[in-house]
Image (spheres, rainbow, N blue to C red):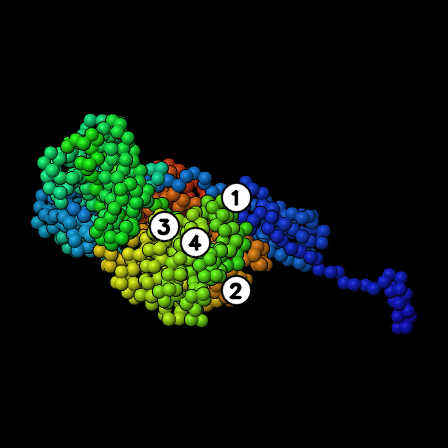
């Protein structure tokens, strides 16, 4: 029997051949669109390769929730009908084979020019000329107090305004107030510091004389905190009285009052609050700070008779006849019949990081006016601004402060190099510039304004290493406006004195330009043609080596005129090995040589330096500043990595660096850029999961503007490898080109970064509010001037907030999903927020509270 069966089987095998088991299908997914990143309305199409007859698929969101499923016959393209913005993981099956990739749907990136706010500084509190006055709340007798300058404490500059109140004998409040220039304000922002107040009362008087009053909650912290008001006819415990008395805002504003209420003091009968950096803000095509509206003497302008050349007389007056803007202009008169060389009008201010200066001038008697600007070191930079001789108003624009017609310099560093920020301005009427050789002349001046930089979000890249520039469009699509990379010295100078930069440097810089990315280039690392101690990075340590490095950096600026920002070395304080020994003095020697060389031929190039100190290297940075290093840089660069902590800790690191700068720079700020900071995913120690990275990236983007950081470069844009256990492989917003999920496919952090970048494009940080329950509520003015908020909690648990509004409210999630909510009959909308930022917009939003 067994033999018979065996014979039959043998016959069958001869007839039909060998029986083989069914084989596993082949399956692969590849991006068609770069990185599988799409925008609203684009069909989601992904390359498909399989020998199976059909495939099935499912798409899950960042929480792992499946949001769509489907199947289709085998083809070269897989179409996924998902249209909602966000980040998704796509899983495809063909038989027993499975493949995965990720994709993202973003809102289109705005092509509107980046605008900003005109910031009218009505409370620098650097002198008593700002016209702030004290009021004792006389309608409720008994209160006493004062308002004056406090030189022992400040948020910026050298002093703040201090309002004190004592209610031991009665009374209800005291206040500080001042009249305002005529501004169509969109918001008011200021900084406050109080040892014992729970709130401030804020009053703004409109054009009809109506007073609009609301409360601004203080956090309970005794350090400086930003406050903002974006809705004038609303807010917490809003009331109105006087004027039209209709509860409707009628701009422009006429007066501002900050009120210290007895009810805000707990367990005492007296209290105080310091105020600083008080600004009234309005929408502008470019961010500006008016320096001379001349609507009142409170701006602090004064007349100077050129006393070092005795004999001249003259005056500063206010002329209501035909001003360029507002109700009046400044009128400067000079009489040299008794001698002298010039007369001038001048003012000082809290240092401003200006990028340009504009002013309007009217005179037929002068061929030019003189401009003097004082930099952070006290150095005066002087130039002439040529006039046409017309009797009409002429606009003059200045983009360079250490040059120009008839340029000279004196005082301070006295090196002919601009060391921003600016802290004073003078406009001169010179006898030598009077047409026809007369001895008297008059010039009217109006609308003097400083253009200030807009905040910029960027990312660090490694195109100077091995990255392919084909990924650059994906960086731009994320909303980054800048990128940071390097051109290695050793690759550019292989023969002494001859420079030939690799083609890849030219290629990625050209790609940056075509994609609208501002460049920050690092001149870095050593060259064994010079100092070569066979140590890490071969740091220059001799004068000859430093001179050679400076020549290379200058060659870099010569080769690429599109470079506006040049960093001197990368992380000297942790990697400059060999005889240089990572020390502050060795870095200063290199920085000084490079700064002097580059600035001589490229005065407009911003030199970025400071050793890139992180929060563990404060002693290093302090020594660097003490040695005078701040003279030889325009921007201080820091790398405040804090892997084990939430991004709000960045604020403390920034503030610590800023305090050190002020300590060794005469109380004057230098711009601070974060040129590296980030969190890595994967399995290495201190790694975070991908949703946490996304949350932290967005919170970091939102946190740094509140600490006056002009630029934030996330480290870095792309995963540098595919090993999950390697820390350096996993900082990116997108996957490595060799990743199994597909080349450059997005991590959740890419979408979170893109959402925040879109919200912050052209936006201005205004301040914080404190709804309670540990919530962080940051308020911004969007690129179009309308306010929006970013709200999250650091406590870990979700909470519900109430948005008080009179009209539609736009709510945008961490991953860009936007919905419009309509308030109920009570004017309220409830929104759930958590550790992820939620963006709340709408011009009718009055406040956010917790239940």
Residue at image point 45% right, 65% down? 529
Q: Name the residue under label 2.
A: 724
- Which residue occupies 41% across, 52% down? 557
Which residue is label 1 attached to? 39
Q: Is mark 1 on a helix, strand or loop?
A: strand
Q: What residue is at 45 percent from the left and 57 percent from the top?
A: 486
Between disc 2 and disc 3, whose residue precedes? 3
Q: How far apart are marks 3 and 1 (CA)?
A: 44 Å
Judged from the image, the secondary structure of the residue bearing numbered disc 3 is: helix
Report if residue 520 is visible in the image.
no
Side of 807 where 79 appears, left or right: right
Q: Do the residues labelled 2 and 1 touch (CB within 8 Å)?
A: no
Mark 3 crowd level (few <14, some 14–19, many ≥20, 10 Å Cα): few
The label number, if any, that marks residue 750 in the structure image: none
N-term-proximal mark, 3 vs 1:
1
Q: In front: 298, or 301?
A: 301
The label on residue 601 is 3
Mark found first going from the N terminus, 4 or 1:
1
Which residue is painted at 17% across and 39% down in the image?
A: 342
Locate residue 453: give its quadrant. Answer: top left
Circle 4 residue: 556
Discs 4/3, front: 3
Q: Are marks 4 and 1 in contact (CB under 8 Å)?
A: no
Find the distance from the CA under tag 2 to the CA under tag 1: 29 Å
Local packing at callout 4 (Cα closer than 10 Å; few below 14, some 14-19, many 20+) is many
């Amino acid at each position: 029997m067994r033999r018979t069966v065996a014979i039959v089987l043998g016959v069958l095998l001869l007839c039909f051949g060998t029986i083989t088991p069914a084989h596993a299908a082949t399956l692969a997914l590849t991006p068609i669109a770069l990185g599988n990143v799409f925008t609203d309305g684009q069909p989601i199409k992904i390359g498909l390769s399989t020998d199976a007859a059909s495939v099935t698929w499912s798409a899950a969101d960042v929480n792992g929730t499946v949001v769509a499923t489907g199947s289709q016959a085998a083809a070269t393209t897989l179409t996924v009908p998902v249209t909602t913005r966000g980040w998704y993981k796509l899983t495809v099956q063909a038989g027993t084979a499975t493949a995965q990739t990720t994709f993202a749907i973003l809102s289109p990136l705005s092509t509107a020019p980046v605008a900003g706010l005109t910031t009218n500084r009505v409370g620098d509190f650097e002198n008593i000329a700002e016209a702030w006055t004290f009021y004792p709340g006389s309608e409720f007798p008994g209160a006493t107090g004062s308002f004056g300058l406090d030189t022992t404490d400040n948020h910026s500059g050298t002093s703040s305004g201090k309002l004190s109140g004592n209610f031991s004998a009665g009374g209800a409040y005291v206040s500080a107030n001042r009249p305002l220039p005529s501004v169509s304000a969109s918001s008011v922002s200021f900084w406050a510091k109080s040892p014992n107040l729970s709130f401030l009362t804020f009053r703004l008087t409109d054009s009809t004389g109506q007073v609009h009053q609301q409360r601004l909650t203080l956090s309970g912290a005794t350090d400086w905190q930003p406050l903002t008001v974006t809705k004038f006819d609303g807010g917490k415990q809003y009331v109105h009285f006087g004027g039209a008395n209709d509860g409707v805002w009628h701009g422009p504003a006429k007066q501002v009052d900050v009120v210290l209420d007895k009810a805000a003091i707990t367990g005492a009968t007296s209290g105080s609050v310091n105020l600083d950096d008080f600004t009234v803000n309005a929408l502008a095509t470019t961010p500006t700070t008016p320096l001379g509206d001349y609507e009142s003497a409170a701006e602090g302008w004064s007349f100077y008779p050129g006393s070092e050349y005795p004999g001249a007389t003259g005056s500063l007056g206010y002329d209501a006849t035909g001003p360029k803007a507002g109700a009046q202009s400044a009128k400067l008169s000079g009489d040299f019949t008794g001698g002298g060389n010039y007369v001038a009008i001048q003012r000082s201010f809290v240092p401003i990081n200006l990028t340009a200066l504009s002013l309007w001038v009217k005179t037929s008697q002068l061929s030019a006016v003189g401009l003097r600007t004082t930099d952070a070191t006290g150095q005066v930079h002087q130039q002439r601004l040529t006039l046409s001789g017309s009797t009409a108003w002429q606009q003059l624009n200045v983009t360079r402060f250490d040059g120009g017609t008839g340029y000279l310099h004196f005082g301070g560093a006295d090196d002919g190099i601009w060391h921003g920020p600016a802290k004073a301005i003078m406009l001169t009427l010179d006898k030598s510039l009077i047409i026809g050789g007369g001895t008297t002349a008059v010039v009217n001046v109006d609308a003097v304004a400083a253009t200030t930089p807009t905040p910029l979000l960027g990312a660090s890249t490694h195109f100077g290493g091995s990255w392919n520039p084909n990924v650059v469009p994906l960086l731009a699509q994320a909303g980054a406006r800048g990128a940071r990379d390097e051109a290695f010295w050793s690759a550019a100078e292989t023969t002494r004195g001859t420079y030939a930069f690799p083609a890849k440097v030219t290629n990625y810089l050209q790609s940056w330009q075509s994609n609208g990315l501002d460049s920050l280039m690092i001149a870095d690392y050593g060259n064994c043609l010079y100092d070569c101690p066979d140590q890490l990075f071969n740091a220059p340590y001799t004068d000859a080596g430093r001179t050679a490095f400076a020549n290379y950096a200058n060659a870099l600026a010569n080769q690429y005129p599109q470079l506006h920002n040049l960093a001197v070395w990368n992380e000297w304080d942790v990697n400059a090995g060999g005889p240089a020994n990572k020390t502050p003095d060795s870095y200063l020697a290199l920085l000084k040589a490079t700064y002097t060389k580059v600035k001589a031929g490229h005065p407009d190039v911003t030199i970025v330096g400071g050793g890139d100190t992180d929060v563990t290297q404060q002693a290093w940075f302090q020594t660097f500043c003490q040695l005078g290093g701040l003279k030889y840089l325009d921007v201080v660069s820091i790398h405040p990595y804090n892997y084990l902590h939430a991004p709000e800790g960045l604020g403390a690191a920034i503030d610590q660096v800023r305090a050190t700068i002020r300590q060794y720079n005469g109380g004057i700020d230098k711009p601070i850029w974060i040129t590296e900071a980030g969190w890595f995913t994967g399995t290495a120690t201190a790694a975070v999961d991908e949703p946490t990275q996304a949350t932290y990236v967005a919170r970091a983007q939102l946190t740094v503007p509140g600490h006056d950081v002009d630029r934030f470069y996330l480290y870095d844009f792309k995963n540098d490898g595919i090993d999950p256990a390697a820390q350096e492989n996993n900082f990116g917003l997108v996957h490595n080109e060799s990743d199994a999920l597909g080349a450059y496919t997005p991590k959740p952090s890419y979408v979170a970064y893109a959402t925040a970048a879109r919200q912050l494009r052209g936006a201005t940080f205004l301040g914080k509010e404190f709804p309670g329950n540990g919530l962080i509520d940051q308020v911004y003015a969007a690129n179009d001037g309308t306010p929006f908020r970013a709200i999250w909690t650091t406590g870990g648990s979700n909470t519900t907030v109430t948005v008080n509004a009179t009209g539609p409210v736009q709510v945008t999630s961490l991953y860009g999903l936007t919905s419009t909510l309509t308030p109920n009959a009570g004017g309220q909308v409830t929104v759930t927020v958590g550790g992820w930022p939620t963006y709340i917009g709408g011009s009718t939003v009055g406040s956010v509270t917790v239940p």
